[in-house]
């Protein structure tokens, strides 16, 4: 069994410990997020009518959090910076647990709103720190072989966190799950300490990484995107994804608010969406994604998301009920994470290293979270005079532009790839 697992995962004997620790770190991190996400959505149902304001606050806090993270990571060695951030997160979870358990009225409502914003920022910072840590631990040759195995740990964490929440929330209530998340982050910290001992960072490399973090300002990243038609097209694609995702999320929250379910049942409902979607996604990633992208190319791979979105919007226009939103969310997220997201990440393989990190930082933070805020404002504006079915029909034509942008980006990537190959002889 060990022999076949080694051949399947491409892990050498001396790499087993660090690969298992890295996968365990990713498992604990994503399990934490996928326990907290349905909790946030279940508690936040009462704010379903003013999600635009929460998305605007999320956007503002992302703009503030990014330079704070860069300051911490840019001025402290890795062995101190990463635990500092996760200890701070654990302290935050204890505060949320106390406020949501023992407060009531407007105090509890405000705590729920802060949780909504906080979780989006934590997701961004947690995943960014993780992949930055992995870049310090593994050499490029190792990364090509081992990132797949490490990614399996993350997917297992997402599935486990969602399934545990679905199982436990109706039985013990949502509040003890905050304590579970604190324990999961403690597991991540144990993995981090093991990796620090086994894979100390070269001082020169650590100094270079710190300098890169300090230089990744939002202004420089924005200029990198604005000056490039290629990155501007990616920004347009990301904004259209935000439009579709925010529309379905707002409608789902409205339907959940009117369902009459209690907090435990609402938490289980949201968790069930996550584990069904993650389960389907991992099967597709293992068996279909690579073969599909090789056959249809990056452009059509990104276009899959637009075509699924068009079908989902058409169905929701005919029957926006809670059960329909369940499958709409599963379909949209599966298309994104199983096909469109891997294709989108491939777009960055044909740009310079500095451009890649600056543009990707800006697109994944400012553009993505700003798109959520703009889409939610648009949704609330349209809902003043339309029902949800009419809003879905009004947004439907945007999927054609989304498809065109995906195909255009695929062609640009192929052209850049050919040019680089020719330049290298």
Image (cartoon, rainbow, N blue to C red):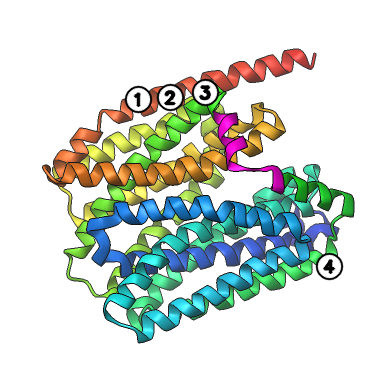
Instruction: Decide whether residue 308 is among the magenta residues.
Output: no
Q: Earlier in the sequence, mark 3 or mark 4?
A: 4
Residue 71: quarter of image: bottom right
Residue bearing mark 1: 401
Query: How many angstroms separate mark 1 from mark 3 (CA)?
Result: 14 Å
Residue 43: quarter of image: bottom left
Q: Residue at x 52, y 43 (%)?
A: 364
Query: How many angstroms separate mark 3 from mark 4 (CA)?
Result: 42 Å
Q: Residue at x 53, y 34 (%)?
A: 343
Q: Earlier in the sequence, mark 1 or mark 4?
A: 4
Outermost residue on the bottom side: it is 102
Instruction: Decide whether residue 223 is among the magenta residues.
Output: yes
Would you say 308 lies left or right of 317 here? right
- Residue 261 visible to the viewer: yes
Residue 203: quarter of image: bottom right
Residue bearing mark 2: 405
Which numbered dot is residue 197? 4
Residue bearing mark 3: 410
- Residue 8 visible to the viewer: no
Which secondary structure lies at badge 2? helix
User: What crowding class fits label 1: few (fewer than 14 Cα within 10 Å), some (14-19), or many (20 or more)?
Assistant: some
Residues marked 1 and 2 touching at CB (< 8 Å):
yes
Residues marked 3 and 4 touching at CB (< 8 Å):
no
Boundaries of the magenta span: 213-225
Query: How many angstroms separate mark 4 from mark 2 (CA)?
Result: 46 Å
């Amino acid at each position: 069994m060990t022999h076949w697992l080694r051949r399947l995962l491409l892990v050498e004997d001396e790499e087993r410990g660090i690969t298992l620790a890295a996968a365990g770190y990713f498992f604990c991190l994503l399990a934490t997020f996928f326990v907290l996400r349905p909790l946030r959505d279940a508690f936040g149902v009462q704010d379903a009518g003013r999600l635009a304001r929460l998305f605007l606050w999320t956007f503002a806090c992302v703009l503030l959090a990014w330079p704070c993270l860069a300051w911490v990571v840019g001025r402290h060695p890795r062995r101190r910076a990463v635990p500092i951030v996760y200890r701070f997160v654990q302290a935050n979870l204890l505060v949320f647990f106390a406020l949501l358990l023992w407060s009531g009225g407007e105090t509890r409502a405000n705590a729920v709103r802060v949780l909504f914003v906080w979780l989006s920022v934590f997701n961004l910072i947690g995943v960014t720190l993780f992949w930055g840590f992995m870049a310090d631990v593994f050499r490029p040759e190792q990364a090509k072989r081992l990132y797949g195995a490490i990614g399996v740990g993350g997917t297992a964490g997402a599935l486990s966190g969602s399934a545990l929440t679905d199982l436990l929330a109706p039985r013990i209530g949502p509040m003890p799950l905050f304590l579970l998340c604190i324990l999961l982050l403690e597991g991540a910290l144990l993995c981090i300490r093991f990796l620090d001992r086994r894979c100390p960072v070269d001082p020169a490399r650590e100094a270079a990484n710190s300098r890169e973090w300090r230089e990744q300002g939002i202004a420089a990243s924005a200029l990198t995107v604005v000056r490039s038609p290629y990155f501007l097209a990616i920004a347009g694609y990301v904004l259209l994804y935000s439009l579709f995702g925010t529309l379905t999320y707002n409608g789902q929250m409205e339907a959940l608010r009117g369902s009459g379910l209690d907090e435990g049942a609402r938490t289980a409902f949201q968790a069930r969406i996550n584990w069904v979607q993650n389960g389907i996604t991992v099967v597709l990633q293992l068996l279909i994604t690579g073969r599909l992208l090789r056959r249809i190319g990056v452009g059509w791979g990104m276009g899959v998301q637009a075509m699924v979105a068009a079908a989902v919007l058409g169905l929701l226009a005919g029957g926006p009920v809670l059960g329909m939103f369940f499958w709409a969310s599963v379909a949209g997220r599966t298309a994104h994470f199983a096909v469109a997201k891997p294709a989108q990440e491939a777009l960055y393989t044909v740009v310079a290293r500095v451009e890649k990190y600056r543009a990707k930082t800006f697109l994944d933070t400012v553009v993505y979270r700003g798109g959520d805020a703009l889409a939610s404002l648009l949704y609330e504006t349209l809902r003043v005079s339309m029902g949800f079915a009419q809003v879905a029909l009004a947004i439907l034509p945007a999927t054609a532009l989304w498809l065109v942008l995906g195909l255009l980006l695929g062609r640009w990537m192929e052209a850049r790839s050919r040019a680089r190959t020719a330049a290298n002889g």
